[in-house]
Image (tube, helix red, strand yellow):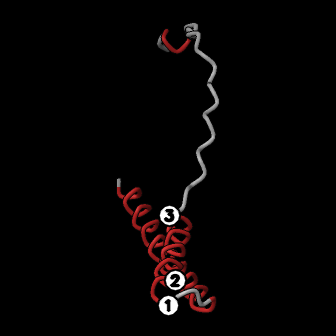
Amino acid sequence: MPESKNRYKHHHPGHPATPHADAKPKRSAAFFLAVLAAVLGVAVTFFTRGADTLWIITGAASGAIVGYLIGHNMDKAIEKDRKVE
């Protein structure tokens, strides 16, 4: 049997593993764009239809829905790009 299997194994002193910082929570573009588009929807509705409450609520809701859908598609595209790399 070769001597290398029986010889004393050298232990090199190492540094203890440092704990990794917790990953930042994933930020969503969908929420940010939903809020931004809702504000934009309110502004556009206010300037086009006046101070009618029903139209302002409709503009905010439609803007939020469109902003959410655009942001959700952006999030999916970003995740797809990250998986390819």
Q: Could you tell me which residue is drawn at 60 percent across and 33 percent down?
A: 20
Question: What residue is rendered at 58% in x and 14% in y?
Answer: 14
User: Observer-nearest residue: 44 or 30?
Assistant: 44
Displayed quadrant of residue 83: bottom left
Q: In this view, does 59 lie to the left or right of 81?
A: right
* Residue highlighted by disc 1: 49
Which is more N-terminal, label 3 or label 1?
A: 3
In the figure, 71 relative to 19: above or below?
A: below
Nearest the eye: 70 or 47 = 47
Q: What residue type is labelled 2?
A: Phe
The residue tagged 3 is 29
Q: Distance between the residues labelled 1 and 3?
A: 29 Å
Label 2 crowd (10 A; few <14 / some 14-19 / many >=20): some
Q: Nearer the viewer, residue 83 or 63?
A: 63
Report the mark closest to the observer, 1 or 3. Answer: 1
Q: Give the total of numbered labels.
A: 3
Disc 2 to disc 1, how far (Cα)? 6 Å
Image x and y of residue 42, in percent: 53, 79
Q: Quickly name the residue at label 2.
A: 46
Earlier in the chain: of badge 2 and badge 3, it is 3
- Per the image, label 1 sits on a secondary structure element best described as helix
**Number of other residues with Cα within 10 Å of mark 3, as a class: few under 14, some 14 to 19, many 20 or more:** some
Mark 1 Cα shell of 10 Å, populated few (<14), some (14-19), many (≥20): few
Secondary element type, mark 3: helix
Is the residue 23 above or below the residue 43 in the image?
A: above
Question: Could you tell me the amino acid type at mark 1?
Answer: Arg
Badge nearest the viewer, 2 or 3: 2
Q: Where is residue 27 in the image (x, y as percent from the top left)?
A: 55, 57
What residue lies at 51% left-to-right and 83% top-to-bottom? 46
The reply, left or right, for residue 77 in relation to residue 49 is left
Q: Residue 33 carries which label?
A: none
